[in-house]
Image (cartoon, helix red, strand yellow):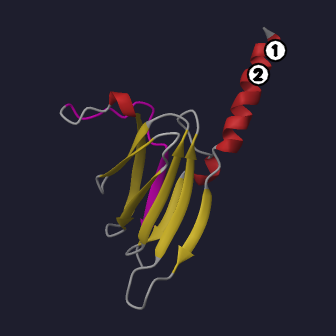
Amino acid sequence: MRSVAFARRGGARLGRLLALALVLGSATTAAGEEPVRRFEVVVKDGVVAREVRVLKVSQHDRVRIRWSVDRPLVVHLEGYDVSVTARPDAPQTMEFLARATGRFPVHAHAAETVRPEQGHAHGRGAVLRIEVHPR
């Protein structure tokens, strides 16, 4: 029993390490275009690392988030109504122009539970939030 508890704690610790998301930074596009903010987020056991639970961008930034997951998930950005479906073998990129300012939750749903005709439930809450600050 003790080794099982240790394995669970060790697995959780490993999960947190694997859940680290890398902020790839921003890149400036051609003159007159919005800057691009790139992020890579890893979702492990339905969570992301505590350090990246808030992604901060500026209004008018083009935002690209690459989602890597350990099980099939539909990732949905509230307020912008943007969704992607990611699988362990097929990370997906969510892209949007940060027009509206504020704090927007991002929810992850098990892919098999999402039925467009019935909507979806948020269960455990947001996996992270995106803060869009005025320029």
Q: Is residue 113 above or below residue 125?
A: above
Return the x and y of residue 130 as percentages of the image width and height: 45, 57
Quadrant in the rendering for residue 118: top left
Q: Is residue 79 left or right of residue 33?
A: left
Residue lying at 79% horizontally and 21% vertically, measured from the top left: 6
Work out which residue is located at the far top of the displayed protein and give it.
1
Prevalent SS, magenta region: loop
Q: Does residue 77 appear in the picture of this structure? A: no
The residue beneath circle 1 is 3
Residue 83: give its label: none
Q: How many marks?
A: 2
Q: Nearer the viewer, residue 67 or 46?
A: 67
Residue 74: in magenta span: no
Dot 1, crowdedness within 10 Å: few (<14), some or many (≥20)? few
Dot 2, crowdedness within 10 Å: few (<14), some or many (≥20)? few
Return the x and y of residue 16 as percentages of the image width and height: 68, 40
Work out which residue is located at the far front of the displayed protein and give it.
89
Q: Is residue 102 above or below residue 107?
A: below
Return the x and y of residue 112 as percentages of the image width and height: 36, 28
The residue beneath circle 2 is 7
Residue lying at 63% horizontally and 58% vertically, measured from the top left: 22
Residue lying at 41% horizontally and 42% vertically, measured from the top left: 107
Quadrant in the rendering for residue 104: bottom left
Q: Is residue 35 left or right of residue 113?
A: right
Q: Secondary structure at mark 2?
A: helix
Q: CA distance from mark 2 to mark 1?
A: 6 Å
Return the x and y of residue 18 as percentages of the image width and height: 67, 43
Q: Secondary structure at mark 1?
A: helix
Range shown magenta: 118-132
Of the 4 image quadrants, the one containing the C terminus is bottom left
Q: Are marks 2 and 1 in contact (CB under 8 Å)?
A: yes
Mark 2: amino acid: Ala
